[in-house]
Image: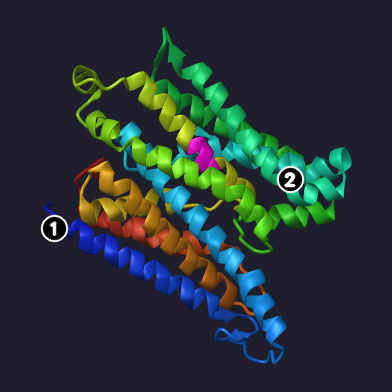
């Protein structure tokens, strides 16, 4: 089935404008009312605190996490040449979730509430993702070469082990930790502060730079590993850098926001349909669309059950699953191209 491609520059311009509009909409929306000066709040200092101290850091977190997950998903699909691939396929998300869960359940005992409040959960998530990546690298490397098939199999197995360990920790959690875990495992951007943004931003921005630098070698890998090697691509090194970049992107994101599904799978699909498989446009386009999707999803999560705050992972699953089904039905009996 032929698919018409959108011109690249207009498409990027449209995505950028839509992202700016979504940020402004999210700033103007909330439980206290609508508008830059929230309804019912007459004190300008309180209004400023609500908009700049509560809503804006949450929006920035949504942009960073959405961009990181979208770009990481595009790289994973290019690496495996499989449109179903996402960062969860190799267990990085599960490793980060396990590390963060350990800190939620045991961290206060080990380090005290002061350290845990700022550093504990993010550090646990990033450490868990890095450990998982190291183990994956060890299991998937044979004679100096990274085997893609072994990487997938090891990722699935280790991800299942990490999920099992996370489940065991749930039985050790007290009531307060269990409430945090229940909300966190569904994905949530609530309660973020500027201090967390200061920690996350360097990881996400550096990972995006590395992910985009992998665009050309990923384009070569679309031709097959042997052909890519003949054209000068150092396949083993590219695979390793892809793992490092995805870990830098996904580990901190999961540590700060919990497990948010479908962004890494659906977003690259939609961008590929619009712009084609060229990773020079696919990766930054997926970053923009991922940020847009998560900002809009989090805005909806704050509004649909006022004054409650619905986990954003529920919204992304509710939006992503129908889109995924539509993509499958749209292709009919044909395979979805990688």
Residue 130 placement (x, y as % from top left): 59, 31
* Residue drawn where x is 61% and y is 59% of the image: 188
123 w.r.t. 269: above or below: above
State how the image is colored.
Answer: rainbow
Camera-nearest residue between 206 and 106: 206
SS label for mark 2? helix
Q: Which residue is mark 1?
A: 4
258 w.r.t. 93: above or below: below
User: Does the magenta-highlighted stretch encompass residue 1?
Assistant: no
Q: Are marks 2 and 1 in contact (CB under 8 Å)?
A: no
Camera-nearest residue between 7 and 173: 7
User: In the image, 224: left or right of 289?
Assistant: left
Q: Which residue is mark 2?
A: 119
Q: Look at discs 2 and 1 and give the one toward the viewer.
A: 2
SS label for mark 1? loop
* Mark 2 to mark 1 CA distance (whole Å): 47 Å
Q: Give the magenta range.
A: 246-250
Camera-nearest residue between 142 and 84: 142
Quadrant location, the C terminus? top left
Residue at far front of view: 45
* Residue drawn where x is 32% and y is 42% of the image: 83
131 w.r.t. 197: above or below: above
Residue 61 placement (x, y as % from top left): 56, 58
Q: Main secondary structure of the magenta part?
A: helix
Residue 329 placement (x, y as % from top left): 26, 56
């Amino acid at each position: 089935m032929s698919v018409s491609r959108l011109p690249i520059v207009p498409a990027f311009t449209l995505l950028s404008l839509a992202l700016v509009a979504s940020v402004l909409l999210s700033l103007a929306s909330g439980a206290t009312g609508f508008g830059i000066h929230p309804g019912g709040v007459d004190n300008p200092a309180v209004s400023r605190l609500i908009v700049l101290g509560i809503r804006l850091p949450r929006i920035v977190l949504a942009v960073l996490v959405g961009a990181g997950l979208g770009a990481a998903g595009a790289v994973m699909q290019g690496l495996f040449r499989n449109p179903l691939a996402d960062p969860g396929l190799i267990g990085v998300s599960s490793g980060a979730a396990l590390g963060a869960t350990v800190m939620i359940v045991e961290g206060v005992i080990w380090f005290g509430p002061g350290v845990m409040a700022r550093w504990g959960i993010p550090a646990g998530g990033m450490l868990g993702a890095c450990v998982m990546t190291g183990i994956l690298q060890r299991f998937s490397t044979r004679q100096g070469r990274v085997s893609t098939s072994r990487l997938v199999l090891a990722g699935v197995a280790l991800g299942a082990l990490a999920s099992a360990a996370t489940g065991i920790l749930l039985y050790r959690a007290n009531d307060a930790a269990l409430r945090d875990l229940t909300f966190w495992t569904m994905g949530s951007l609530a309660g973020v502060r500027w201090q967390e943004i200061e920690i996350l931003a360097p990881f996400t921005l550096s990972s995006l730079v590395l992910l985009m630098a992998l665009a050309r070698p990923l384009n070569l890998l679309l031709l097959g590993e042997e052909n890519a090697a003949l054209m000068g691509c150092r396949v083993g090194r590219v695979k390793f850098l892809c793992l490092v970049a995805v870990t830098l992107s996904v580990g901190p994101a999961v540590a700060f926001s919990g497990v948010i599904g479908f962004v890494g799978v659906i977003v690259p699909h939609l961008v590929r349909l619009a712009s084609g498989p060229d990773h020079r446009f696919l990766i930054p386009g997926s970053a923009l669309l991922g940020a847009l999707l998560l900002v809009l999803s989090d805005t909806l999560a704050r509004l649909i059950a006022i004054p409650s705050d619905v986990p954003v992972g529920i919204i992304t699953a509710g939006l992503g699953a129908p889109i995924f089904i539509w993509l499958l039905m749209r292709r009919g009996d044909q395979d979805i191209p990688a």
